[in-house]
Image (tube, rainbow, N blue to C red):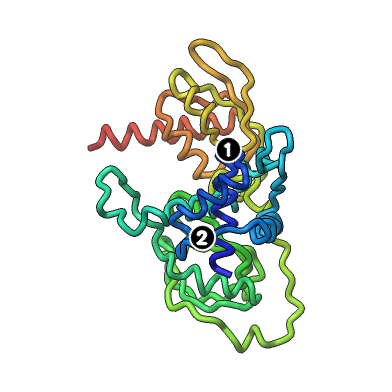
C-alpha cells in the first residue's frame, strides 16, 4: 500500500513537470529514490496505480495520442490545489531530508511550535470527539476549555485549531503553542448530545487575511509604489486582490476582506511603499497607529 501511494505521488509530480511516454515512466520509476525496492513497473500495474492516483488526488491522467505520451488533463486545476501542493512539497522535501544537514546551501526556517499536538487534534476531528485542555492566553489567566475541534490552519508558522467551545457554545480559534494538558474528554463525548456546529472550513477564513474573522468584510483600495507593486502582483495580499490601475510609478489594488488587526500589520509591513486609499475609517486607523509609533520612538 505504501509503495502504491509513493508511486501515485511520484507519477503526479513527474507528469506535472512534463508529459511522458510509458517507457519513460517505466525507466524513471526504476531509477527513482521513491522506488525503495527497485521494482520493475509493468503496464498492468501502471494502469491500476494510475486509476488509484486519479481517485486519490482528483486528477485526470490521459494518454495523448497526438504526442504519444501520458499527461494531466486538468493541470491548471491542480496548480491551485493547496492539499496536493502540500503533499507534493512534503514528497519533494523527503528526498533531501535524510542528508539535509550535509547541504549547507539549504537553509530552513524554524518549524511551527507545538506541532506534536496535531495528531491528537486531527484524531479528535475525525472521531468528532471533545477535547479537554488548559489554555494560557497572553491577556488572561489559564482557563479550562472543553472544545469540539473542526479544522486546523497553519498561518505564519503557527498552528491554530478552530471549532466550538462546548461551555459557551461559541466559535473559537486557539493557538496550539498555548494549549496545555491536552486530552480527550470521553465522559462528554460519549453522551448523545444534539450538538451541531455551523463551521465550514472552506469558507471560514474566506474574507480574512490571517486567523481573525471578526467584523464584516469591506472593499479596500490600496496604492503600492514601485517596486512593492511588482511584489504584490507576484504574491497578492489576499485571494480577492484585483489590479485597478497600473502606472510606471504605482499600482492601485482592490481587496474584499475584513480590515482586522493582522491585516493592518501586513499593510504596515510594506513600510511607506503601500498606502490605504479607501475606506476612510481604515485610513484613519492606520494614521493613528503610525502616530502612536512615532510617539514611542520619540520617547525612547
Can residue 219 be seen here? The reply is yes
Residue 131 in which image quadrant: bottom right
Q: Quadrant of the N terminus?
A: bottom right
Q: Residue at x 61, y 16 (%)?
A: 245
Q: Are marks 1 and 2 in contact (CB under 8 Å)?
A: no
The correct choice, above or below, for 210 with respect to 275 in the image is below
Q: Nearer the viewer, mark 1 or mark 2?
A: 1
Residue 168 in which image quadrant: bottom right
Can residue 211 be seen here? The reply is no
Secondary structure of the residue carrying tag 2 is strand
x and y percentages locating residue 187 in the rendered image: 61, 89
x and y percentages locating residue 33 in the rendered image: 43, 56
Secondary structure of the residue carrying tag 1 is loop
**Which numbered tag is attached to residue 18?**
1
x and y percentages locating residue 167 in the rendered image: 62, 75
Q: Nearer the viewer, residue 285 or 162?
A: 162
Q: Residue at x 59, y 73 (%)?
A: 147
Q: Nearer the viewer, residue 248 or 180?
A: 248
Judging by the rendered image, the residue that carries numbered circle 2 is 160
The correct choice, above or below, for 16 with respect to 54 in the image is above
Q: Nearer the viewer, residue 22 or 163?
A: 22
Q: Residue at x 61, y 50 (%)?
A: 213
Tell me if 92 is positioned left or right of 97 in this view.
right
Label 2 packing within 10 angstroms: few (<14), some (14-19), many (20+): many
x and y percentages locating residue 218 in the rendered image: 66, 36
Q: Nearer the viewer, residue 258 or 93?
A: 93
The correct choice, above or below, for 119 with respect to 154 in the image is below
Q: Earlier in the sequence, mark 1 or mark 2?
A: 1
- The CA span between labels 1 and 2 is 36 Å
Amino acid at each position: 500500500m505504501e509503495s502504491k501511494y509513493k508511486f501515485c505521488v511520484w507519477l503526479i509530480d513527474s507528469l506535472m513537470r512534463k508529459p511522458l511516454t510509458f517507457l519513460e515512466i517505466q525507466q524513471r520509476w526504476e531509477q527513482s529514490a521513491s522506488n525503495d525496492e527497485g521494482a520493475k513497473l509493468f503496464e498492468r500495474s501502471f494502469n491500476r496505480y494510475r486509476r488509484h492516483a486519479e481517485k486519490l488526488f482528483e486528477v485526470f491522467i490521459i494518454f495523448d495520442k497526438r504526442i504519444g505520451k501520458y499527461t494531466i488533463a486538468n493541470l491548471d486545476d491542480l496548480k491551485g490545489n493547496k492539499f496536493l501542493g502540500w503533499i507534493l512539497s512534503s514528497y519533494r522535501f523527503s528526498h533531501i531530508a535524510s542528508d539535509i544537514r550535509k547541504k549547507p546551501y539549504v537553509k530552513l526556517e524554524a518549524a511551527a511550535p507545538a506541532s506534536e499536538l496535531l495528531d491528537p487534534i486531527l484524531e479528535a476531528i475525525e472521531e468528532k470527539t471533545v477535547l479537554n485542555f488548559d489554555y494560557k492566553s497572553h491577556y488572561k489567566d489559564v482557563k479550562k476549555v472543553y472544545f469540539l475541534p473542526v479544522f486546523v490552519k497553519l498561518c505564519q508558522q503557527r498552528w491554530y485549531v478552530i471549532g466550538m467551545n462546548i461551555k459557551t457554545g461559541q466559535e473559537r480559534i486557539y493557538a496550539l503553542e498555548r494549549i496545555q494538558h491536552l486530552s480527550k474528554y470521553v465522559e462528554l463525548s460519549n453522551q448523545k448530545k444534539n450538538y451541531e456546529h455551523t463551521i465550514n472550513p472552506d469558507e471560514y477564513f474566506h474574507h480574512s487575511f490571517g486567523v481573525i474573522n471578526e467584523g464584516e468584510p469591506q472593499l479596500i483600495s490600496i496604492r503600492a509604489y514601485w517596486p512593492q507593486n511588482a511584489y504584490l502582483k507576484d504574491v497578492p495580499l489576499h485571494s480577492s486582490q484585483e489590479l485597478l490601475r497600473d502606472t510606471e510609478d504605482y499600482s492601485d489594488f482592490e481587496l474584499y476582506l475584513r480590515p482586522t488587526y493582522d491585516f493592518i500589520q501586513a499593510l504596515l509591513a510594506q513600510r511607506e511603499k503601500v498606502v490605504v486609499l479607501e475606506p476612510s475609517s481604515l485610513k484613519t486607523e492606520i494614521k493613528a497607529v503610525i502616530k502612536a509609533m512615532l510617539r514611542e520612538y520619540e520617547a525612547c
